Amino acid sequence: MSSCRVNGDQGRPWGRAVLLVSLLAATVIAVPAAAGTSGAPGAENRVVVDATAPGRPFPHFWERMFGSGRAVLSLRESYRDDLRAVHKITDFRYVRSHAILHDEIGLYSENKNGEPVYNFSYIDQIYDGLLANGVRPFVEVSFMPAQLTPFEPDMTGRNLEVRQGFWYRPVNSPPKDYARWDALMSAFARHLIERYGIEEVSQWYFEVWNEPNLDFWAGSPKQSTYWTLYDHTARALKAVDTRLRVGGPATAQAAWVKAFIEHCQKEHVPVDFTSTHVYGDDTAEDVFGTTEKISREHMVCRAVKKVHDEIHASAMPSLPLIWSEFNASYANYPEVTDAPYMGPWLAQTIRECDGLVQDMSYWTFSDVFEEGGVVKKPFYGGFGLLAAGSIPKPSFNAFALLHQLGEERLSADAEGALLTRRHDGTLVVAVWNYREVKASDTAARKVTLDIRHSGAGTATLQSIDGEHGNVNVTYQKMGAPRYPTREQLTELRAAGALPAAVTRPLEGGKLTFEIPPDGLTLVTIGAHN
């Protein structure tokens, strides 16, 4: 959902672990662990790695697109600093944000005669800034300009019937006049093409609205009125140039996709991709209509598979699926999104969702973010990889390590593990020690890699855990300042950085190590060592 349902500041200890192992050509032969998908903490887990195996393409679908705070925030230097930082450690290609049509952008107004007036000044600055930093827009077409609604709400948000609950009060109303909406969409598309060229803009995406099945859409009935909005938007954009890519329904909780495809097919409405959202703590009742208990570990990819299968069974089975929001939580829980927990959770999500989706957009890359109001302190469970002040969280380091996975996945991997191969032949194995958020067991996981047919003599290890690469330790020692000084910010950024790699010998082709609570380790092994 992209909305902060809970504004929790509570924090408590957490214990999670993930291991990344890079090898020169390998196959994993699973030796089952005593319990769970990630092995029994405290017990030895042996993974046999044979350096000969077929593979299949493994595109980095989890790191090519990120969500962000609303569009106007991209004009801030702090936003662009964070964008550059995440771009440096990932394959960041697209950014999605809410509210490109919000009144604070100034795109649409009406003069004293009631005639539409367009102003593209901020639009240009927003998209110029993204492109200058190597990232393209994933344009979420939202929300409604106030003067285009039938209710004429003012900027104070007093007219609550057409204002969603975010701090910046987006208007969630259908337009008062679809002819004016169509004209706005046409003018928007023409301007973008005139400024950037169709060869560029045809590589963007245009997603119609955000989560219309929730309170972001005030049309009634929700689904049929959203169909009307989608139809007008898609047809208006395609009328400017058929190469523009348009899709939806951008729903929460993996909803409406089957019905959306059926509608587009029946009414001959253009659609180039489908999109939807889910979070790790969404409920089975909301997502699947069942009463079963699905853990945070499996919820996202269970939902992805559901939608993947719906598309495959539809009249448009080749439609790309873009998961335009996901995270372990839709709320603000420091023990989740600010914690080392995100390493194993992300690794498990990548493992399960591979092959089911074109791209997944992590919500969000930065805590330059104001849906619940102005950020009050650096660590409050925000969605971003970087806390306020560009402080890297453990999730930032998890993305940095998982970025080093290869471009090919080998088929013979193990539960709780990922084995991939890079273009140069180096292999990367991820092994993790996942535990649910409220689990009390904090034992380490002992792992032995039995490496065969490699010939390597040494390994390099790069690790983060509860004490290393986890800025929360330093922050708490500082007394958890609400407003860190500039000197403290410098110290916190250094404390959150990835520790340097170390080299260890392989003994008889084996490497034994412990994955401590909160641990995430990258081990690189190859004949060149």
Image (cartoon, rainbow, N blue to C red):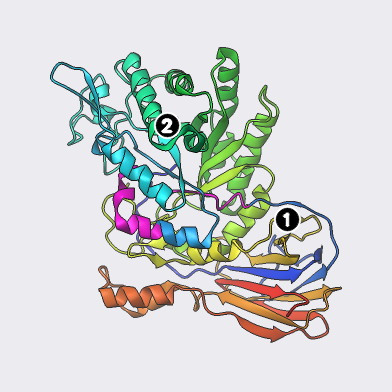
Q: How many marks?
A: 2
Specify whether 201 is left or right of 188.
Answer: right
Kindly check if marks 2 and 1 are in contact, taking CB atoms under 8 A apart as contact.
Answer: no
323 versus 350 height, above or below: above
Quarter of the picture containing the C terminus is: bottom right
x and y, in percent, of residue 263 in the image:
56, 18
> SS of the residue at dot 1?
strand
Residue 75 shown in magenta: yes
Specify the amino acid type for callout 2.
Answer: Ile
Crowdedness of circle 2 by 10 Å Cα count: few (<14), some, many (20+)? some
Residue 106 shown in magenta: no
The residue drawn where x is 66% and y is 40% is: 305
The residue drawn where x is 66% and y is 25% is: 316
The answer, for residue 349, to whether it is visible in the render is: yes
245 versus 458 height, above or below: above
x and y, in percent, of residue 452 in the image:
85, 73
**Residue 240 versus residue 451: which sits nearer the camera?**
240
Q: Which residue is mark 2?
A: 193
The residue drawn where x is 42% and y is 77% is: 495
Q: Which residue is mark 1?
A: 408
Specify whether 75 is left or right of 31.
Answer: left
Quarter of the picture containing the N terminus is: top left
The residue drawn where x is 32% and y is 73% is: 489
Crowdedness of circle 1 by 10 Å Cα count: few (<14), some, many (20+)? many
**Residue 527 versus residue 491: which sits nearer the camera?**
527
**Residue 330 versus residue 394: which sits nearer the camera?**
394
Specify the amino acid type for callout 1.
Answer: Glu
Find the distance from the CA under tag 2 to the CA under tag 1: 36 Å
Q: Earlier in the sequence, mark 2 or mark 1?
A: 2
- The magenta segment is 60-82
> SS of the residue at dot 2?
helix
